[in-house]
Amino acid sequence: MYIDKNTRVLIQGITGRQGSYHTQKMLDSGVAVVAGTTPGKGGQEVCGVPVFDRVFQALDQHPADASMIIVPPPFVLSAAEEAIEAGIKLLVIITEHVPVHDVMRLKAMASKKGVTFIGPNTIGIIAPGQSKVGIMPTFLYGQGGKVAIISRSGTMCHENASNLVNRGVGIGAVISIGGDPIIGVDFVEALEHFRHDDSIGAILLIGEIGQSREEKTAEHLLEHPYPKPVFAFIAGRYAPKGKKMGHAGAIIEKGMGSAKGKIDSLRRVGVKVAMSTQQVADELSRWQEESQQ
């Protein structure tokens, strides 16, 4: 997983309403939030966490492994560039409505510098029982296990995770990749991240209508057979035809990106696609029982 119990987190935008709220939630969950930044507000504290004007100033006194960026959309690119230049190797960008061209510039810079970024428009990542860099309610995700969830939808991630926990299925890692058209870590990269991770025994992909990210994942799995069982759920099967959806990444264009196309593509390469969240919990509960025998 990208994070563990030793991960030290910086929060960019810590003095904002959302930044301060989630700082307290992360501290309550035991996350090591070591510092925050907001230009012009250095010297303050938020929830007991020291605030600095610039990232390099914060890191001089409080080394960090990851940064959670929760600043207004027009400032995301400059915040991310600042974190990258300061040497942080993992960025989680919570902000939505980030300009697409800004994300494209960030993607190129991150690739050049060897930086991993997740989002934008994500609820973040969590290693249940260890740490999180995100805004998900920790109690929904349990205290650890062998299932990794990779999701485009924050809400569906919450729902499926809580269903699994209620059924006694342990979750070891969650990556909310975000629903925007241009993102950092995608399904394929996240799958490869877990390929040789012995702590993870099965994968749950949570997709949704729009774009072709799931179809490309199916192509990847066909070319690179996966050593662990992969389960999936595709949200939006009952979305009315012709209706423009609010989610930026959930736009069906010229027949591409339909739920049926995604389900068929994944099933052709051996992915067990559930047709309801209840079935997701049933399938993974059965897998866990069988893997423990």
Image (cartoon, rainbow, N blue to C red):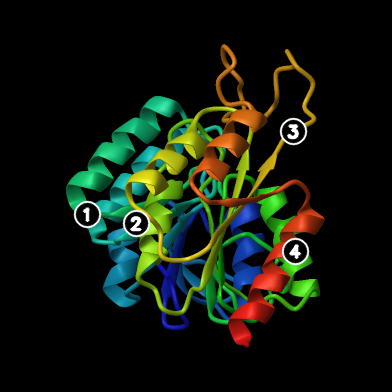
Q: Which mark is residue 114?
A: 1
- Which circle's residue, 3 or 4, is located before the other in the chain? 3
10 Å crowding of disc 1: few (<14), some (14-19), many (20+): few
Q: Is residue 278 left or right of residue 22?
A: right
Residue type at tag 3? Arg
Report which residue position mark 2 lands on: 54
Where on the picture, by quarter, is residue 193?
A: bottom left
Residue type at tag 1? Gly
Residue type at tag 2? Arg
Residue type at tag 4? Ala
Q: CA distance from mark 3 to mark 2?
A: 45 Å
In percent of width and height, residue 72 lies at 53, 40
- Which circle's residue, 3 or 2, is located before the other in the chain? 2
Report which residue position mark 3 lands on: 237
Give the residue at x 69% y 77%: 142
In percent of width and height, residue 160 lies at 72, 58
Q: Is residue 28 visible?
A: no
In this rendering, is residue 255 above or below 262? above
- Which circle's residue, 3 or 1, is located before the other in the chain? 1
10 Å crowding of disc 2: few (<14), some (14-19), many (20+): many
Give the residue at x 51% y 39%: 214
Report which residue position mark 4 lands on: 281
Q: CA distance from mark 3 to mark 1?
A: 37 Å
10 Å crowding of disc 3: few (<14), some (14-19), many (20+): few
Q: Is residue 68 visible?
A: yes
In this rendering, is residue 28 above or below 102? below
